[in-house]
Image (cartoon, rainbow, N blue to C red):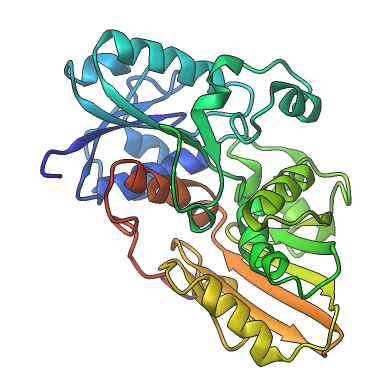
Amino acid sequence: MNTSIKAIIIGANGYVGGELLRLIADHPKFELAAAVSNSCANQLVSETFGHLSQALSGTQFVSRKDWLSKVEDGSNVALFSAAPHGVSAGAIATAITAGEEKNLTLRVVDSSADFRYPEQSAWESIYGVKHGAPELLSHFTCAVPEHLNTISTAHIGHPGCFATASLLATVPLMQSDLTEPNIFISGITGSTGSGRSPQAGTHHPERNSNLYAYKPLDHRHSPEIARLASAASGRESTVHFVPHSGPFARGIHVTVQAKAKVTVSEDQLRDVYVNAYKNSPFVEVVSTTPKLKNVVASNMCHIGVATDGDSIVVMSAIDNLVKGAAGGAVQWMNRLWNLPETTGLTAAAPGWT
């Protein structure tokens, strides 16, 4: 593909939006056409994201009603939504309608939770509000890129960051049928996972030098993880998920535990993951335990394993804002436009963050 694809980012003023802006600024095929934010319209992107002052010098946010003027009729458009849950679906529906009127070839990747369930009733029962565009649910597929070879829809709902880390660690184990169908997941996330708007759980004096669980066994990501894990593995299991808030800004570390059906060696367990991800450029099975500093600000997932023969432990580490959101969205969008999925995503983790 020799022509550039116009990139539109809805909700561009949040943390995920900022990461999308950073990744798109260096992408060789996606050209930023509009950073969409009603609350920041006509302000310089660099006033919100100082670290992007060189990459996006002079670029301003635009309102939702103005982004369409930034693309020509008949353009190819990669539409990323980083809008909040419950808001994103309506914004996407409006954008798709407007794009049809302008004869745009539009592909959408949504980083919110609005298109993670194919059933309107399931989504509404978990999120407690009416879905903003139920007529579009059948037009979206939800999965991590590593677990779906063929895309049958024009648009993608990206799994959540906790779900991404958990699924990458869990699905090969379920496929192997080495364990009992009870999966116990403990995950620790950085404060950026709560979004840019300040709240009690992300207030620095509360979060710094602190560690605590929240919504144990009752988090809304639990049914998402269970559904996507079963869909990807072809096996049913019960997921017991306990999330924790960690005293760092970026990253997720997940530990998955399960009871082995038969005695399993560490080499056997590692081979399960090496074979599962041998064609997945963003997943590395490491020989030690995964560490956040080795993946933060990259699109990588590091996976480590351990076993005493009777119990199995699988650990995964990702950057919640990149692999768990913006990077995973770009990876999906690359595939939607038939580009190599690594395009624009191969920068190494900075280390010592």
Name above or below for residue 159 compared with residue 78.
Answer: below
Q: Residue at x 64, y 23 (%)?
A: 86
* Left or right of 64, for residue 123: right
Q: Nearer the viewer, residue 199 or 277?
A: 277
- Labels in figure, total: 0
Is any part of residue 326 visible from this angle? Answer: yes
* Left or right of 124, for residue 44: left
Q: Position of residue 178 (x, y in %)?
A: 77, 75
Q: Position of residue 249 (x, y in %)?
A: 60, 57
Q: Residue furthest top?
A: 101
Q: Residue furthest left?
A: 2
Q: Position of residue 212 (x, y in %)?
A: 84, 58
Q: Residue at x 72, y 38 (%)?
A: 199
* Left or right of 238, for residue 45: left
The quadrant of the image that shows the N terminus is top left
Q: Nearer the viewer, residue 200 or 220?
A: 220
Name above or below for residue 181 compared with residue 227.
Answer: below
* Left or right of 160, for residue 60: left
Name above or below for residue 321 compared with residue 169.
Answer: above
Q: Position of residue 315 (x, y in %)?
A: 68, 73
